[in-house]
Amino acid sequence: MTLIRKVAAPAIAAFFAFAPAAEAALERVVVRQGPLTVAPYEVRYTSARTRAVRSPRLDGYLVRMHARVVDRAGRPMPVQRVMLHHVVYKTRAHRDPVCGGTESFYGTGEENQALRLPLGYGYRIRRDDRWVAGWMLMNHQARTQRAYIEYTAWVETSRRLRGVRPYWVRATGCEHARDPIFNVLGGAGPGATYERSADWIVPRSGRLVAGGAHVHGGARELRLSQPACGDRTLMSSRPLYGLPNHPYYNVLPVLHEPGPIATSWISTTIGMQVNKGQHLRATAVYDGERPHVRAMGIWHVYLAPGGATANPCTPLPYTANLLPAVPGRLDPPAVDVPLTGLDDLGRAITIDRPPGPVLRSSARAQVTVTNSSYSARNLLLPLGGTVRWRFRGRGFHDVTLANGPVGFASRWSRRGASYRRRFTQPGVYRIFCSLHPIQMTQAIEVRRTP
C-alpha cells in the first residue's frame, strides 16, 4: 500500500522554522511504501516487485526530502525493531551520466541525512515521473515485522527555481557500481589512515551547490578535491558517531561495522565553479589501524548547470558544513563485529564459533556457498594457506570478515562466481554473509603449525 497526502504551508513552516517567507508556496508530500514484511532477523532488500515507489505527482522543484522507517500508524520504528540500512531514490526520467543506469537524486542510510538544497535551487520533477527505490532493511527482532519506508518531499510548485542535476560520485569509481565496496586491511600504527580515491570527469559546466556523504564505520572524512587547482578541497564531509549506548552498538545481528549517525551536509548559495571535462577526485579517508570491511565512500553532489570559466581555480565561496546538534563523537570508535547465532528460544546471541566440527584443511581449501550456509563452518588452515569460496546459491551472498587480524570481504555474488583469499597472518577469522548474518557464519583458525 502507498499513502500520499499534502499539507499546507503552515505545516511546512512548523517543520522548517528557518525557511524564509519566499518558500511559503511549498507543498509537503508524504508517501509510504509498503507494508514490507521482514522475517525474524532477516535482511530484506529491493526486488523487482518492490522497486516502484509513487512520486509526488506534482510539477515543480524538489527542494527538501527525507526518508525513514515507520509503522502502519506512521510512527518511527526504532532501530531495535527495524533498521533502514539504506534507501536510494531514482527517477526513470534521466540516465546517470557517472556510472550508467537510472539517475539517483536522493539517498540516506544509517546517517539519517536529509536533502536540503540552498534557497533558490531545486531538482525538477514532473507529475508523470516514475520513481524507483533501492533499499535494505534489517529486522532485529525474533518476530516478523511489518514496516513502511516513508519519504517526505517539499516541492515548490508556484515559481521557477534554478535547476540542479544530481551526481553519485564514488571513491571506488564505477567498477562494481552495484556493490561499490572496498576493504581496509588494518594493521597500521595508531593514528594511521587509509585512503581510497577515484577521479570523476565533470559532465557539464556549472556550480556545485550542495553535497552529502555516505560512508561506513571507520570513516574519518569524505573529500572532493580539484587536482588541477593544487588539489584543493571543494567539499569535506565529516562523520559523527553515536555514543556507546546508541542502538547501533547494542543490536544483533550486525550487518557490518556500525556506521555514523550523521555526516555533514555541504551547502552554498553562490556555488563552486567547475568546467565540463575537469577531473575532480573523491577520496574516502578511513582509520588505518583496525580492519574495516565493506567500506564505502559515496558523494551525492548537486550541480547547477551554467557556463564555463577561463579560470576554474577562482576563489571558493563561503560554504556551510552542517552536522546536527546531537550527542556523538567525531573519531570512529573501535568496534569488534560479533558473530550471531540463535539460542534455544530462537533469540539472537553472540557466538564465538558456528556449531559443528572443526575441519583440518590442506594449504588449499574449497568452500561451497549454498543458499543457506558455507559447506565448511569451522576450518583449521595452515599459515599461508588459501581458501576459495565457490558460489552456488541462486540469490546474492558474500564472504565478509566480522572480526579478525586482517580485513577482507567479497562483493555480492551469485551462482558461478568465486572469491579467493590467502591467509598470511595467524589468528581466528570470524566470517559471515552480510545478507544472511545468522544463517551463514564461519570461523577460520590460521595456525603456523596446524
Image: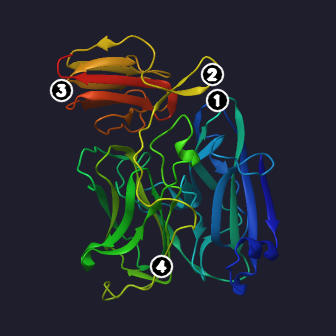
* Marks 4/2: CA–CA distance: 55 Å
In front: label 4 or label 2 = 2
Residue plotted at (48% across, 46% down): 258
Residue nearest the observer in this picture, 54 or 242: 242
Q: Nearer the viewer, residue 354 or 44?
A: 354
Mark 1 vs mark 4, CA separation in Å: 47 Å
**Quadrant of the snapshot with the C terminus:** top left
Give the residue displayed 75% in from the left and 46% down from the top.
Answer: 71
Cβ atoms under marks 1 and 2 closer than 8 Å: yes
Of discs 1 and 4, which sits in the foreground? 1
Q: Is residue 440 visible?
A: yes
Sequence-first tag of 1 and 4: 1
Please give the residue where the numbered disc 3 appears in the rendered image. 384
Q: Amino acid at mark 1?
A: Pro
Residue where numbered disc 1 is placed: 40
Report the label total. 4
- Mark 3 or mark 2: which comes first in sequence? 2
- Residue 359 drawn at (x, y percent): 32, 12
Q: In the image, residue 218 lies at what x, y percent? A: 39, 51
Find numbered disc 3 in the image and state the secondary structure of the residue it sits on.
loop
What numbered label is drawn on residue 305? 4
Under tag 4, what secondary structure? strand
Earlier residue among tags 4 and 2: 4
Image quadrant for the N terminus?
A: top right
Can you tell which mark lies on residue 346? 2
- Determine whether the residue tagged by mark 2 lies in a helix, strand or loop: loop
Q: Is residue 233 left or right of residue 155?
A: left
Q: List x then y, in percent, for residue 370.
A: 45, 21
* Badge 1 or badge 3: first in the primary sequence: 1
**Residue name at image x 36 percent, y 37 percent:** 410
Of the residues shown, which amino acid type is indicated by label 3? Gly
Left/right of residue 227 with respect to residue 146 in the rendered view: left
